[in-house]
Image (cartoon, helix red, strand yellow):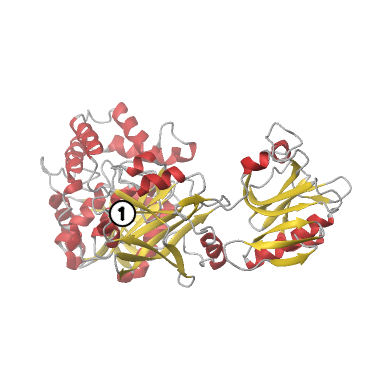
Amino acid sequence: MTCMADAAAAQWVRDKAPDGSGFIRAGSGTPVLLIHGVGMNAAIWQPQIALMKDRHDLIAIDMLGHGNSPLPPENAQLSDFADQALRLLDHLGLTSVSIVGHSMGALVALEIALCASSRVRSVICLNGVFRRPEALAQAVRERAAALGSHGDPSAIAATLARWFGDPLPASLAGAAETARAALEDVSAEGYARTYRLFARADTQHVDRLAELAAPALFVTGSEDRNSTPAMSAAMARIAPRGECLVLRGERHMMTIASPEKVTQHIMAFLDAGKDAVARPEMAPAFNAGEFRRALGSFLTGVTIVTTVSAEGEPRGFTANSFTSVSLEPPLVLVCIAKKALGHSAFSTSRGFAINILSENQKAESGIFASKAADKFAAVAWQSGQSGNPLIEGSVAVFDCAMEQVVDAGDHSILIGRVRDFTHNGAQPLGYSRGTYVTPGLSQEALAAAPHGTEVGAILENEGRVLFFETPDGFHELPAGRGLGSPRDARSLKGCLAAKAVDAQLGFLFAVWDDAADPSHSHVYYRGTVTAPSSGDRQSRLVDIDHIADLRIADPAVRSMLTRYIRERTEDAFGVYVGNEVEGEVRPLGRAASSQTLTGRR
């Protein structure tokens, strides 16, 4: 029979196969089989059908016990659901398809791909489960044992809370209502039989996943607590042609909560065919300049290198043997000792992350340099887009796919291709001669400086610098008497607080004394800033290229900014020390001789 979805959705045909299986078919092109999760039905794929129908022949099946399909056996197996799908493909005359499965549907998709490999071009597992930790497995088993009557409001409410959050974010209300309608409509017995299988099926592919022939993409959300990033990362690692993708901020029902985002990645993987490599969120041209600046955050520094083991467990170690290798393609490397406990996990991994530590992360460095049993329990972290653990508070993070492992004496060199990276203006932690070092002037020491010391900052935001405009049309950098505190209106921190400026000080940039009064000193930092309030007309973010056009009263500050523009363009900063007439720039990060300059900051 034929039915129409709403005006915004795709036209589809709803029908039944000879065995009674319900399905929806829409579109034309290369065939794709869509398999929903427990409690849903074929219509849950409506957003994907609408977005993909012009390029694909889409077949969305009602799993056994769901929609218009008959019940599964009382003690159902994954093979029962896989056989149902294969019968449908036979009925439609389709010899091979790509398969997209969500949650329970992902388990069925893998079962089909493993049992009928010649019929599967590629497989995409959305929010799949794999080797649940014991506490999570027990919770799922208890839910399966406690399933109530059809349409049990409390059970549905608990499910929606797990999927969408409690309290429910307003932005997810529509998606939650769609899921609620499906849960209220599903057969109670069909749901119970399928959920009992789902509760125990997370281990059924453990010994078989290495035999998966098809290209496979394992996708989940960073906020999915039941189908976790570690699970997808572990599956991608074991599958011979597996890739992992973690979508930031997404939960379990991301297919209906963020359909455009999810479908974009589905289509990209399908279009790439057998050589598909998921490059989510790096689709735009790789920004080599920003990548160079992110690498520059490392100053003979300290890193924590992380990955996920084949068992889905996070692993990590402290290292300072890190370096950039190439900008095109973006490659970095790190070394790990062969005698290290994590050597096997890292040398056989499909990827790893390098976390460059900030100067306040000495404790984290010590933890990962130790033999502590559970290092990750003591630090805040989250999964990156490739499933690798990312340490919160790091100066820079590089999420990498494994490019090559090189045997090098008693170490292995891990060369990674950077898939994603972040960096900020915090000061990195260094290590030299057996002790930690920091490159900037200690702000604690500065707090004890003479009260007359002027402390200012060059605060940058996406290629713009923060200035305050005076009533007579001049421009000034944020500055005050001493570093101070937000309560001291005359200090730098007080000046920033008064204008609600959220700034982070980084490296020291210039220190000079007044030539006529050496007791009057000036100290300026580099740093970063968020955009100021639109209501503050005195605060302006000025493009770096336009700073030279500003009216700046203090010639020493004007000269300092001229040097800042030049050094930022060259991405090679130094520290000026002297007075407003003469001094020297001492380069950072290289053993070059100091250059004596006149009238430059």
The quadrant in which the C terminus is found is: bottom right
Q: Is 299 positioned to the left or the right of 399 in the image?
A: right
Q: Is 404 positioned to the left or the right of 492 in the image?
A: left
Give the quadrant of residue 352: bottom left
Give the quadrant of residue 93: bottom left
Q: Position of residue 403 (x, y in %)?
A: 35, 68
Q: Position of residue 349 (x, y in %)?
A: 29, 60
Against 391, residue 116 (above or below) is below
Q: Nearer the viewer, residue 132 or 268?
A: 132
For the question of whether residue 14 can be seen, the reply is: no
Q: Residue at x 44, y 53 (%)?
A: 434
Against 164, residue 412 (above or below) is below
Q: Is 289 positioned to the left or the right of 278 in the image?
A: right
The residue that disc 1 covers is: 233
Q: Nearer the viewer, residue 413 or 268?
A: 413
Q: Position of residue 187 (x, y in %)?
A: 22, 37
Q: Residue at x 34, y 36 (%)?
A: 162
> Number of labelled discs?
1
Against 532, residue 189 (above or below) is above
For the question of whether residue 148 can be seen, the reply is: yes
- The secondary structure type at the circle numbered 1 is helix
Q: Is 477 positioned to the left or the right of 128 in the image?
A: right
